[in-house]
Amino acid sequence: MTHVAVIGSQWGDEGKGKVVDWLSERAEVIVRFQGGHNAGHTLVVDGVTYKLSLLPSGVVRPNKLSIIGNGVVIDPHALFNEIERVSAQGLHITPENLMIADNAALILPVHQHMDGIGEKLRGASKIGTTNRGIGPAYEDKIGRRAIRVCDLGEPEVLASKVDSLLAYHAVMMDYAELPPINKAELLDGLRSISARLLSHARPVWRVLRQASMDRKHILFEGAQGTMLDIDHGTYPFVTSSNTIAGCAATGSGMGVGALNYVLGITKAYTTRVGSGPFPTELTDDIGKRLGERGHEFGTVTGRARRCGWFDAVMVRQAVHIGGLNGIALTKLDVLDGLDELRICVGYRLGDRTLDYFPAGQNAQAHVEPIYETIEGWSDTTHGCRTWKDLPAAAIKYIRRIEELIECPVAMLSTSPKREDTILVRDPFLG
Ligand code: IMP
């Protein structure tokens, strides 16, 4: 058996959906371990498009166990809306095929208010969050105020925790001149979903241990990307969870040695949504062309993504921090037809040259990319299924990326279709 983690190695939106779907066909158990409904994974299975936010990708296939781990923050109303939506598409979600960690923290309506207030207070330096309440829910978790799934089964504990939580947030609600959250309404809302949510609740660490003992393949499905990691990303322009593979263990309750293979999904160029530093960003016609050809609009918010050249320094950092064993390189075809391509191989900061992305906010905003120029290709790579179908210049681009990021390409994706994939190494074969 093999346990594989799939994570994003840039700023998210690397095309995880297709790769995760491909891998989830081989896995018996699929686990989300961080983030919440800020994520957006698009899967196309048998011609049907599924847009998932909180549900693990395993739900689109029969006979898979999907797990939402303790590291995820769960908005129960968003979860049930998503279940309703995919059920209307013919999927069957039951407490037997969707299990939710009983110790996971909930996102409540107050968190969405706090997300909005936080952004307003940040003014011009706002993060550009997805406004789903993700950050404030994690703040309450770390602040030891969160309402957890298991609290729904203990009404007295729930009522007392809701009191403390509302008292804490009342200060900010008052400051923002918003009416106080009504406790009775909040409790009624929670009671209305509690039986249904509790029917899915399990000590998932035990379920995972059993699955591992039963020699099942487990896929850990990351959301967002390394540069949005709360510790290792472009702080404060990040999400509020650890997005790297280390979180697969803490966010699900498995031992640190559980992972046999970490696959980093990597776009052949770079994109980001929301604010924050982006050294290789292109605000010219080439950036526009990448956005148009790559359909770079957010799955969750619909916002246009910023586009730029491939940043090998940043991806190498993601490889080292995340312990990546291989990458899945996606959207190579978006680069078809460009005369030449650029790859960032270092940064200039004042009179210094850096071979890593620094931590300081000013430094991150002011590094200038040092580029290497590579010949482009005029033939198409769209839909290529073997190496020999690829133009020689495209292969050269891929090989140079592997060299610079110090990590091999395990899979190459050449279109959104699952068959349009060149497999070098199956992560489940170790
Ligand atoms: P939050 O996760 O809603 O707090 O947003 C924080 C930052 O992470 C913002 O810049 C978002 O655009 C970004 N972000 C959150 N989720 C995703 C994702 O799934 N893909 C890409 N960016 C994301």
Image: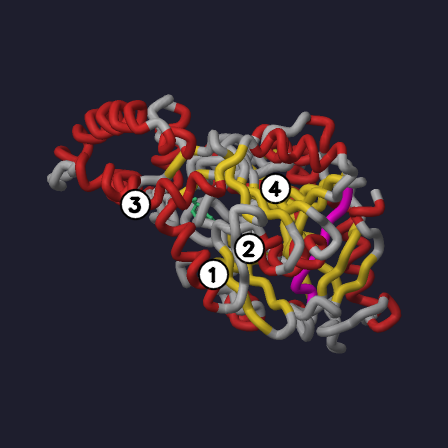
Between disc 2 and disc 3, the foreground one is 3
Between disc 2 and disc 4, the foreground one is 2
The magenta-colored residue range is: 325-333
Q: Provide the residue designation for mark 2.
A: 13
Q: Nearer the viewer, residue 348 or 160?
A: 160
Between disc 1 and disc 3, the foreground one is 3
User: Disc 3 residue type?
Assistant: Ser
Does the magenta segment cover residue 346? Answer: no
Q: Nearer the viewer, residue 68 or 384?
A: 68
Ranked by sequence position, the earlier of labels 2 and 4 is 2
Residue 124, percent across and down? 29, 45
| Residue density around tag 4, few if under 14, some if 14–19, many if 20 or more, within 10 Å | many
User: Disc 4 residue type?
Assistant: Tyr
Q: Marks 2 and 1: in contact by CB < 8 Å? A: yes
Q: Provide the residue designation for mark 3.
A: 192
Q: Secondary structure at mark 2?
A: loop
User: Disc 2 residue type?
Assistant: Asp
User: Disc 1 residue type?
Assistant: Thr
Task: Check residue 347 in the rendering and tell me which mark sits there, or answer none.
Answer: 4
Label 2 CB-ligand 1 distance < 8 A: yes
The residue that appears at 72% across and 31% down in the rendered structure is 258
Label 1 CB-ligand 1 distance < 8 A: yes
Image quadrant in which the C terminus is located = top right
Q: Provide the residue designation for mark 1.
A: 299
